[in-house]
Amino acid sequence: FTIISNETLDGSGNVVVKLLKKELDCRKNDITLLTSTIPFSTSEEFSEPYFKDLSGYFPENYYGTYHIVIDIFDDVNTDVFILTNVTVETSGYRGATSSDTEAWITKPDLSDTDDDGWSDSYEIFDRNEPTNPLAWDTDGDGIKDSIDLDPLHNIFIQVNFLKGSIHDLENWYVEQKNPPYLQMTVDFNFKGTKVAFASPQIACSQDLKSIIYWFLGIADSFEWRPRLNYYSTAMFDHSYTFDIEDDISEFHLNIKLWDEFIGQTDEYGDNLLISQTYTHNLKTAEVDKPVAISGSSGGNSFEAQIITRKLNHTNIIAIYDNSTIFNGHYNNHDRMHVIQLTITDTPSENSPFVHGSNAILIPNEILMNTELNFIIGNDTLQDSVLANAEFIT
């Protein structure tokens, strides 16, 4: 690339240029490949070409992200400098132009650097929303880009339980249990394992019903009179979110309505009122738009919603020990604490954080010996910088 002045300079100063190779491991500093400081003076014109041959620097690991940092120090603010003739020579591969401000450094001997089933050219140039040619799973959801329904977002499902209603009850039931309690559950298969969520037991509080008896009154007056009243509808306000496999186009949910509390046994036992399977098409579903689900059987009914959600890939910062962080993977499985941060400012150049969603992973054995664990355990957040934080176990 070349840096030139638009015209004769009015001021004096320096043009400082650095070429950096970004390190994925936060424990390491970025590699500085080029440092140049060139002075300029009043009434001069500035024109300087810059070139760096990388072939001898990284024989095994030259692909990655490179940053060109240009700082111009001038004692006047009217001088204009232009960055021009930006090119990347890649032994016959496509060269960059002056309009290219970002570039992927892929393996030139491979058509598919990350082995995700898509060529580097397709991921960079042909997709409407480019994916990372250096990562087989751009969004970090565990599904290879080429078979992922949305390789830039993790897809998950939200189920909202709204209400359930029970059929007409007998007087012996109402006499011993009033109001009735209902419960809703949802279960599904995730990677061959059955997963289920169950709401709390909710007392019926709406849709009053009466049990009528033939009543023999004074002076042989016969008439129907209400003897028992009970509510037949329970209002739920419970939402459950769960991850799904992003390489399937249809997802099956089984929603059930129960009389009494599932998992417990009383004199009536647990009574399954409705079991209904719903097939959700992930290809046609609109993101964040609720889809109504209802079921009925034998006078019983329920109402629910299913919503397709999408998440951007979170920048994950892993704590390795009390003094080390890295953006990578642990060698072994471990129990973790997760701290989620939303960064609204622009982090400094060497910060492990990025603008947007960030998650810090801390192994339990490390967290136990930290001041943070003491603050959470003793409920003294109000006295710390974490006063507005929310901790969920």
Image (cartoon, rainbow, N blue to C red):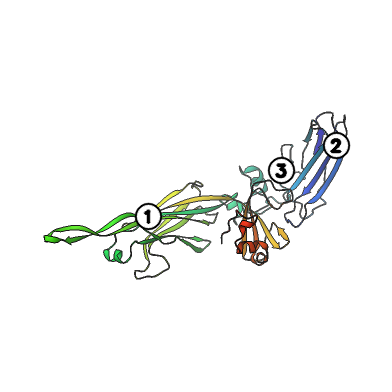
Q: Is residue 31 visible?
A: yes
Q: Quadrant of the N terminus?
A: top right
**Count of picture labels:** 3
Given the current orientation, which residue lies at the most extreme left position?
A: 219
Labelled pair 1, 3 in contact (Cβ < 8 Å)? no
Q: Position of residue 112 (x, y in %)?
A: 67, 51
Judged from the image, the secondary structure of the residue bearing numbered disc 2 is: strand
CA gap between label 2 and label 3 equals 28 Å
Give the residue at x 14% y 61%: 218
Labelled pair 2, 1 in contact (Cβ < 8 Å)? no
Q: Position of residue 299 (x, y in %)?
A: 31, 57
Judged from the image, the secondary structure of the residue bearing numbered disc 3 is: loop
CA gap between label 1 and label 3 equals 52 Å
Amino acid beneath label 3: Glu
Residue marked by disc 1: 295
Mark carried by residue 13: 2
Q: Nearer the viewer, mark 2 or mark 1?
A: 2
Mark carried by residue 102: 3
Q: Position of residue 38 (x, y in %)?
A: 87, 39
Crowding near the residue tagged with mark 3, few <14, some 14–19, many ≥20 C-alpha atoms within 10 Å: few
User: Position of 375 compared to 2: left or right?
Assistant: left
Give the camera-side residue of 112 and 388. 388
Which quadrant of the structure image shows residue 198?
bottom left
Q: Position of residue 378 (x, y in %)?
A: 61, 64
Which quadrant of the structure image shows residue 278?
bottom left
